[in-house]
Amino acid sequence: MASMLEFRTPGYNPYAVKYSPYYDSRLAVATAANYGIVGNGRLFCLGLSAAGVQCEKTFETNDAQYDLAWSEINENQLIVACGDGSIKLFDLGVENFPVMNFHEHKRETFSVCWNPVTKDSFISSSWDGTVKVWSPTRNASIKTLPIGCCTYSTSYCPSNPALISAVSGDSSLRIFDLRTPVSSKYHLTNVIPVHAPATGGQGYSRLVDGQIYSGTVPNEVLTHDWNKYNDTVIATAGVDKVIRTFDIRNPAGGPLALMTGHEYAVRRVAWSPHASDILVSASYDMSVRVWTDGSTMPQHVQPPVPSGRQPDTVRAGTQLGLMNRHTEFVTGVDWCLFGAGGWCASAGWDERVLLWDAASLLRG
């Protein structure tokens, strides 16, 4: 690969990396000592210059850091998810200590996401089986959404501030709509069984080679992300190594596309902000892979079934590139929002953050 920058986090193992939504030259890395098993955490705020990647500021926490999100209303602020169940808001203009501390989760906070539309709230998910909605101006949460099992990832819809998604250890993708009455479901509108076959329509789906897609054994879902151009499509991945895309308008329809190739669990997926069909994945197999979900490619026409009604076809996504410079689990990956499109940052337990041009992979 022609273009690659590197930053080391000695003594700390990264869990997440995020580009700033304001600057193409700023990013942050959430890390943990001793692989997050025991010890403190350190937030690295990095800047890009002619001299390479430089550390501009660090913030210490008493427990491991598992995720982070930049503020959408203040370019100098970001939140960090911590192993003690807390969420801390740091300001680059304030030394050493957080400006706000949010602590209601009973177990590790594993994911945070800032509302990209209204920009006045953020959400967190925890191993205690809940998703919480917060305001950066108050210590107490605004709302709690119960999941019931270990919740690894939560996110806002990129175009609708009322839609919240979450994936968890029970093999499910859940969609909450805050516009609905609380009722007995606490705003829950859809539960999509990630590893199940289609149960609506024809009752089954076909793979592109004509075989019947019968689903797989349920496994923990570790990560998900909303498509930035089609706000009804979500990609999920986890322990079974397969990346799947779903249309939340058809929760019983099974997956739209399958992407296979990783050799171990997929820890993070992220849709490209520059193309509707491109996404990147980070895995415990020490690789980062770039994919197309096949949505912009011509579709193979299936022969008709005896009933005359055509079942849904599960597309086969295609791997476009492979970045294998990491030497340990890759736990974080993110796209830069700016420029011609294609720059990614990845972080892994090898104590390294790598910045590289995904477009160079696509060019071969």
Image: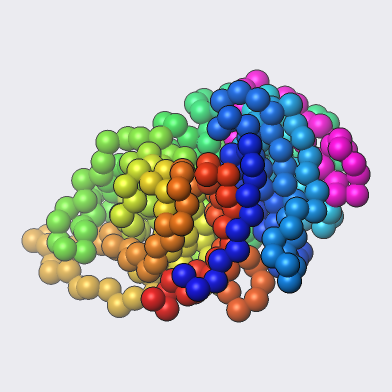
Which coloring applies here?
rainbow
Furthest residue toward top: 106
The answer to whether residue 91 is magenta is yes
Furthest residue toward right: 94
Furthest residue toward left: 306
Instruction: Report whether residue 187 is seen.
Output: no
When the figure is inspected, residue 226 is found, relative to residue 90, above or below; the finding is: below
Q: Position of residue 12 (x, y in %)?
A: 63, 38
The quadrant of the image that shows the C terminus is bottom left
When the figure is inspected, residue 85 is found, relative to residue 270, above or below; the finding is: above
What residue do we see at 60% from left, 58% from top? 6
What residue do we see at 65% from left, 25% from top? 39
What residue do we see at 55% from left, 55% from top? 346
Question: Residue 306 or 63: which is nearer the viewer?
Answer: 63
When the figure is inspected, residue 64 is found, relative to residue 316, above or below; the finding is: above
Query: What's the magenta region?
Result: 88-110
The answer to whether residue 103 is magenta is yes
What residue do we see at 21% from left, 64% from top? 208
Q: Is residue 351 left or right of residue 114?
A: left
Q: Position of residue 247 (x, y in %)?
A: 43, 56
Question: Residue 98 or 196: which is nearer the viewer?
Answer: 98
Instruction: Report whether residue 65 is seen.
Output: yes
Q: Position of residue 238 (x, y in %)?
A: 41, 42
Q: Is residue 267 left or right of residue 83?
A: left
Q: Position of residue 241 (x, y in %)?
A: 34, 46
Q: Is residue 318 left or right of residue 333?
A: left
User: How many callouts does the rendering have?
Assistant: 0
